[in-house]
Image: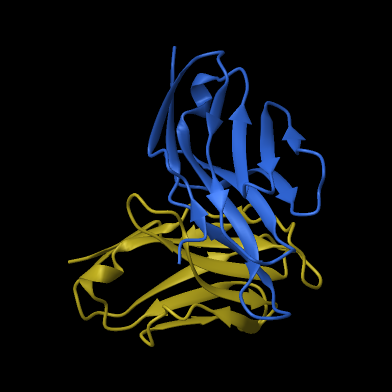
């Protein structure tokens, strides 16, 4: 079953504008973590931001913020003041315990391709 | 360079051949993950090590796949009798963690791109 859903295959944004990338997730666990990673054309996945399921405040990391709405099971990434170097694939991920008491393993969505126009 | 390194970057093989990939994690990281990524998809979990112990393995992982991390440092992923469906990017990631935690961020290598002809 699909645990992480990213419904936007591609997004376009003007340089210096803000953009929101959508992510919804599905779990009955109470304890989980939500992540966003960036994958440029070089292929290396880069960690951007983390939100814990018990965190009451939305996470922020520089120009990145995570709009966490627990009741709606959404964890959207907001990138403010887009830069040309932000053009990349963006993946939402959720860390879940695959078995009771086991390790938390990140599960990834299909990704959203972001293109920043000058 | 102190990041995660993977070797080779690209591998072309004929169907039925065996291939082996290597991953060197960040030196102080005790946890190591293998993922597979096909075009247009996100990374799919394959297996996970803590030190030298293989603690998790995807139920989707064929018996043709085997991974090792013999001394708790580098890891190898071997695919036996390759099939065209094995063509993908194989990503390795590492982290440092103790106990079960939701907030461990992964550090990824650039991957090994496998093409099976």
Q: Is residue B2 visible?
A: no
Image position, residue B76 (x, y; %): 50, 75
Residue A102: horizontal and vertical position, in percent? Answer: 70, 78
Q: Colour of chain B?
A: yellow
- Picture quarter containing residue A81? top right
Q: Residue at x 67, y 59 (%)?
A: B26
Chain corresponding to blue in the figure: A
Depth order, front residue of A74/B23: A74
| Colour mapping | by chain
Relative image position of residue A88 (x, y in whole percent):
46, 35
In the picture, measured across the screen, residue A26 lies left or right of residue B39, that is: right
In the rendering, at what x and y percent does residue B93 appear? Answer: 58, 61
Q: Which residue is at 57% across, 45% downward?
A: A37
Relative to residue B82, is residue A4 depicted above or below? above
Residue A46 in view here: yes
Foreground residue, B55 or B4? Answer: B55
* Residue occupying the point 43% across, 70% down: B21
Left or right position of A99 against A22: right
Choose top left, top right, bottom left or bottom right for residue A74. Answer: top right
Left or right of residue B58: residue B48: right
Q: Quadrant of the image for the C terminus of chain A?
A: top left
Instruction: Tell me the residue at 45%/67% (across/down).
Output: A1
Toward the viewer: B66 or B1? B66
């Amino acid at each position: 079953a699909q645990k992480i859903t990213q419904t936007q295959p591609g997004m376009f944004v003007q340089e210096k504008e803000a953009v929101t990338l959508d992510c919804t997730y599905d779990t009955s666990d109470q304890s989980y973590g939500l992540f966003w990673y960036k994958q440029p054309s070089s292929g290396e996945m880069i960690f951007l931001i983390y939100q814990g399921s018990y965190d009451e405040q939305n996470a922020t990391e520089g120009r990145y913020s995570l709009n966490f709405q627990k009741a709606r099971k959404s964890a959207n990434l907001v990138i403010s003041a887009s830069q040309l170097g932000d053009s990349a694939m963006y993946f939402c991920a959720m860390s879940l315990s695959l078995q009771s008491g086991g390790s938390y393993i990140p599960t990834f969505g299909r990704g959203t391709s972001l293109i920043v126009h000058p | 360079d102190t990041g995660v390194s993977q070797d080779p970057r690209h591998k072309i093989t004929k169907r039925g051949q065996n291939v082996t990939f290597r991953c060197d994690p960040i030196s102080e990281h005790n946890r190591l993950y293998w993922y597979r990524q096909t075009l247009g998809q996100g990374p799919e979990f394959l297996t996970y090590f803590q030190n030298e112990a293989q603690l998790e393995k995807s139920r989707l992982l064929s018996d043709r796949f085997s991974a090792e991390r013999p001394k708790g440092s580098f890891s190898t992923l071997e695919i036996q009798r390759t099939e065209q469906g094995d063509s993908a990017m194989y990503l390795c990631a590492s982290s440092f963690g103790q106990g079960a935690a939701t907030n461990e961020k992964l550090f990824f290598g650039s991957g090994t791109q496998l093409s099976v002809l």
